[in-house]
Image: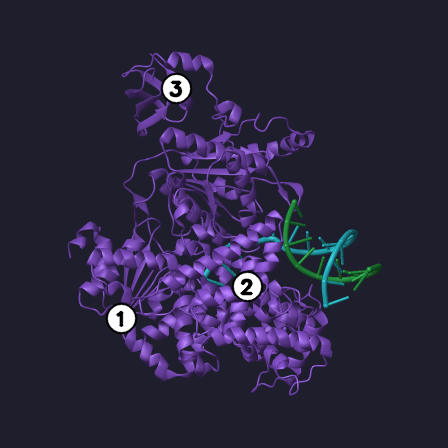
Chain colours: A purple, B cyan, C green
Amino acid sequence: MNYLESLNPPQRKAVKHTEGASMVIAGAGSGKTRVLTFRIAYLIDSGVDAFNILALTFTNKAAREMKTRISDIIGGSEAKNVTMGTFHSVFAKILRFHSDKLGYPSNFTIYDTQDSRSLLKAIIKDLKLDDKTYKPSLVHGRISSAKNNLISAAAYEANSDIVTEDRMSGKPRLFEIYKAYEKRCFAAGAMDFDDLLYKTNVLFRDHPDVLHFYQRRFRYILVDEYQDTNYSQYLIVKKLAAMYENICVVGDDAQSIYSFRGANIENILNFKNDYPKHTTFKLEQNYRSTKTIVNAANSVIAKNKDQIEKTVWTDNTEGNKIKVIRTLTDNEEGKVVTNLIYETKVNEQAANSDFAILYRTNAQSRSFEEALRKLNLPYKIYGGLSFYQRKEIKDLLAYFRLTANPKDEEALKRVINYPKRGIGKTSIEKVIVAADHYSTDENPVSLWDIITQPSKYPAGIPSGTMNKIAAFVTAIKSYTVQLDKVDAYELAQNIAKSSGILKDLYDDKSPEGVSRYENIQALLAGIKEFTENVGEDETAYLSDFMVDVALLTDADEEKEEDKDKITLMTIHSSKGLEFPYVYIVGLEENLFPSQMALNSRTELEEERRLFYVALTRAEKNATLTYATSRYRWGNLITSEPSRFIEEIDKQHLDVAKSGRSSGGGRSLNQVNLERKTGSATKSVFSTKQRNLKRVSSADTKPKSGTQASLLDLKVGNNVMHERFGKGKVVGLEGSPPVKATVFFPKSGNKQLLLKFARLEILD
DNA sequence: CTTGCAATGACTGAT
DNA sequence: TCATTGCAAG
């Protein structure tokens, strides 16, 4: 077990303490993943059957990577027997196995957020409620948090506190919507994301035999990112661990950023009460970032009240100060950041993948995309509209879903008239009304039941339309027959062709249409790969492919061509990642911290933790930017710098202004804006505003005067660099020289391209 | 039932 | 700005 040598003492202790409850409080960049990986490897090495280990991770990608790492450490193929994945994917599998106990089919559909909202919208309409008072997203949030606290629709209705609360907020009929939603999900054989956890709790509660089976099986339980678990997840873990209490949770209260999803920071704060005999390990040495970044992050998070006491420190170098840049508009912000990236790439020989641009909201990506495209810098955007959420993909997947589970209401509504076959809104509305009419609590009737048994369930649909519906039903049934006859790829292709989707998209020659067609081809190619990736004498069926397609995200699959690209993502999705150069952008009041978070201390503290997460992603350099005005919904609004900039200890900051000439001529409007916000900016930054760096494209061109003198540069010369300060030339390449290695007392050796570095020779 | 146009409202975050 | 929705006409 030589591998244990590579750990520091607290890490090693956390790994070797395998029996009993333990909590690992892991500061940012302290090697948390290493501890988890080594711990599992060590367990297996000590003779624990991998089959008895359950590890709950934050993403499925993290699980895959961890398995590979474990195999590398201990060799052999044992690692693949560990049950590892996100809460949602692990328990979705378990639920499929025992679905009959809950009255669900094993091929139940997983409704994603879109599906849930669309169903809620339909219900609100059916109940003849105003969808402005009952906004689907709001209603969904309410139901979601109820489920995450294990409150069923019936319990919701019976809870006078909740009902009163709803009545006070002008939404007295929310419980009715919840009841109808629960009923229709069940009739459709569908579970939403929250159900995957909620129903797992129900399964364990109502079927002690099933619970005992998994308690015995999962003798060792590990939970990553424990600070971001909600009550429902907390309870699942608690129940499973009740028999052996060999539970190890890993997390950092300072990085809890998912309360909107029901995450409860109390879970980690209360761990010691739940397991009085637990041991706590603290990982406080940061291996990721420079002293500047670690200390800056510490100075920010110190402003929060609720914390587990710990001191994150590092042995790494001091590093550069955190640059703060003000720009006039969001577009300029895009240009400035992109130019800085370009410059750094050249000066420091950095790869594209060394850079990340992190923002608070997905909508902010636009200006950076535009600027990056102009400079031909390759980038990859995570989040936002993922591949599986695109309309054309969801349409084809809806056919697959319907084939596997014809009761799926959302899938049916999506494709019953796509491609167009003359089945309109009124007919579908009649089907929905009929289904509701014939449904009872014991015997739910799905939309599919209505359209397949018209004599049993008359819905008053004209015979002409009924014929069209019958043709559609025949088609779906013919797909269903093929489910276990042909492999996933063959069936998928059959459906794509015979449903008419492929033709419909092929006929659309607009650029968007072409791209949609290509996306469908990409999906089919993906299914082909899936089909070919199973063992020799096995067949991959379409239902196998569909199992967790709803749980896949962009972050889960990394394409080969995305290896060396600049990363653009929200701070939320950057959790757990690290980059040498990080740009945190849009640091403005009402954006970050978000407007919605200004009402309470706890919400503001979560925004601050989010900022802490962002800062601690950086290894070498962090840059903060904000714009004094930006476009929102098409019109210009002014904004003030974020309070978070002020909260960083001044000694770590390097406050600069952006180049005034950037972007050429400015409109009168912008000049006025600048004047208006100027005073506010000054009051925030009482420190001197050094006119440090001009970053517009015109300015990055070398000045002829400087260029000439650099031709005489020799090893041993003392030089001055704008950012690194005074240094000594220790190496040169080319004649005349094009590249120099310069030693800077503060930052060490740097390779600089003379074309860009604008060195000044001092002697 | 479908099409085309005008009006409207959306931006936290994501399994 | 952009995508979705509501309404009138074919």
- The residue tagged 3 is A759
Q: Are marks 2 and 1 on the same chain?
A: yes
SS at mark 2 in the image? helix
Going by the image, does A745 lie left or right of A355? left
Label 1 is placed on what type of residue? Phe
Q: Are marks 3 and 2 on the same chain?
A: yes
- The residue tagged 1 is A51
SS at mark 3 in the image? loop
Measured in 3D between alpha carbons, the distance from the residue under mark 3 to the one under mark 2, in whole angstroms, is 63 Å
Label 2 is placed on what type of residue? Lys
**Mark 3 residue crowding within 10 angstroms, few (<14) / some (14–19) / many (20+):** many
Residue A34 found in image quarter: bottom left
- The residue tagged 2 is A497
Residue A35 found in image quarter: bottom left
Q: Would you say the residues marked 2 and 1 are in contact, meaning their CB atoms lie under 8 Å apart?
A: no
Indicate the position of residue A664 as horizontal and vertical percent values.
60, 26
Q: Would you say the residues marked 3 and 2 are in contact, meaning their CB atoms lie under 8 Å apart?
A: no
Q: Quadrant of the C terminus of chain A?
A: top left
Q: Chain of mark 1?
A: A
